[in-house]
Image (tube, rainbow, N blue to C red):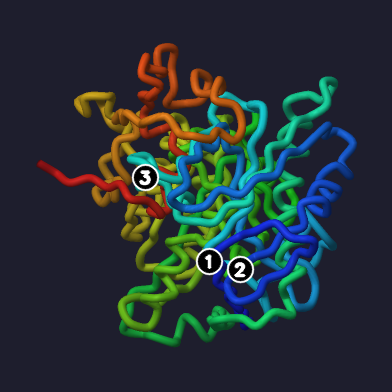
Amino acid sequence: MKLELRKIYVKDIVFSDKTYTDSGVLYINKEEISKLILEDERLQEVAIDIAKPGDSTRIIPVKDVIEPRAKLKGDAFPGTDGKLDEVGRGVTYALKGCAVVTTGPIVGFQEGIIDMSGPLAKYTPFSKLNNLVLNIKKKESVSPHEHEEAIRLAGIKVAHYIARQCIEARFDEAEIFQWKDLSVKLKEYPDLPKVVYVYQCISQGLLHDTYFYGRDSKEMLPTLINPLEVFDGALVSGNCVSAGSKTTTYHHQNNAIIKECFKRHGKEINFIGVVLSPMTTVLDDKYRNSILTSRIVEMLGADGVIQSQEGFGNPTTDLMMICKRLENKGIKTVLISNEDAGVDGKSEPLPDGTKEADAIVSTGNSNATLRIPPMDKVLGDLDALEHITGGFEGSRQEDGSLIIEIHGILGSHNLQGYSYLGAVTI
């Protein structure tokens, strides 16, 4: 399979009477976008704003971030927007340097915050993007699960629509990805270790879900997937998990581990596969998924595994159970996880563990606190602060500043390593 990713670099967003891109500027017709969103009868109103790097703007509570992408032929985001068809091949347009951000009244208590400037900005990659912010309100009768679905679909539809309007524009760079047949890959670099990425996604229900080709991942078993599908929107975030460790749709589209594996393929490793493994709340499912995931990896003939998780708490059990099985099969495994070590950093950092987990990359202590100044503009609802993970009663200070834990910052300790934070042993 061959995927050509044509990148258009967006340096600015402005409102216009037409949606298109030219010379690094993305022009947005606000009325078109509003009409598209309100086609969903569950939604009552939408306010559309632009938030640029350096602006004194706070976005809270953030639900998802999506990079605009579209196929030259066919549809990106299969099963979610447009027809259900195979992706991961052909030509895809990606609008880099910008994103669609969804906000509005809180759905689940674990949504997050983005500041476009100030001390918080360095902890989230989304402060560096030109963001089209959709502040969406539902009708009163809509349930929380319908609310989540409506907002999720609205963000994807808008990102897809914008990219479709730009596929005839001149692109700035083309990146080619090749994914060969497994029989070829296994023989390609015989002197390099064969490496598989175990891609764990949250699949818990209770507003904690991921969608693969539009299918709720908690209904899936561990599956061997083509990494190029991920770049085309086959994986979509549908969860309100802790903002710091949440894998947004943008994170899926730009999976840092997959990109790094491609970069090192043929030089340091032979990157041979990706196993998508759901993380549920049911203990039997955790056992079953650990058995099936490790079996697939073993059947691929892997020498080593990179394993990432999503969320915190019971997902760490999935992480450790799979690691233990892989290591006991002689497959060296490196884990990526954050730490919940308390505000002072002295508490037990992980809720579960195993002696086989002897190679862990930390994305930092999510309980560390940060004091942030007030912003001139708030998109969304600042009152949500006390209900998101990382916020608490007393977060607001008399001078207008806020004290929050790193947990509450969107993408602050992302478990694919797409973050500013890390940890060292002292």
Q: Kindly tell me whether residue 127 is visible in this rendering.
A: yes
Q: Kindly tell me whether residue 284 is visible in this rendering.
A: no
Q: Position of residue 188 (x, y in %)?
A: 44, 87
In the rendered structure, the answer to whether residue 166 lies left or right of residue 356 reads right
At 39% from the left edge and 73% from the top edge, which residue is drawn?
194
Few, some or many C-alpha atoms within 10 Å of disc 3 (few <14, some 14-19, many ≥20)? many
In the picture, which quadrant includes the C terminus? top left
Q: Specify the amino acid type for callout 3.
A: Tyr
Asked whether the residues under the numbered discs 3 and 2 touch, taking CB atoms below 8 Å apart as contact, a structural biologist would say no
CA gap between label 1 and label 3 equals 21 Å
In front: label 1 or label 3: 1
Which of the two residues, 44 or 28, is positioned nearer the viewer here? 28
On residue 11, the disc is 1
Instruction: Tell me which label, 3 or 2, sits earlier in the chain.
Output: 2
Return the residue at label 2. 25
Q: Is 250 placed above or below 172 here?
A: above
Q: Position of residue 203 (x, y in %)?
A: 61, 39
Instruction: Tell me which label, 2 or 1, sits earlier in the chain.
Output: 1
At 37% from the left edge and 34% from the top edge, which residue is drawn?
406
Label 3 element class: helix
CA gap between label 3 and label 2 equals 26 Å
Which of the two residues, 100 or 238, is positioned nearer the viewer here? 100
Q: Is 405 placed above or below 48 here?
A: above
Instruction: Tell me which label, 1 or 3, sits earlier in the chain.
Output: 1
Q: Specify the amino acid type for callout 2.
A: Val
Few, some or many C-alpha atoms within 10 Å of disc 2 (few <14, some 14-19, many ≥20)? some
On residue 123, the disc is 3
Q: Quadrant of residue 313?
A: top left
In front: label 3 or label 2: 2
At 73% from the left edge and 25% from the top edge, which residue is drawn?
144
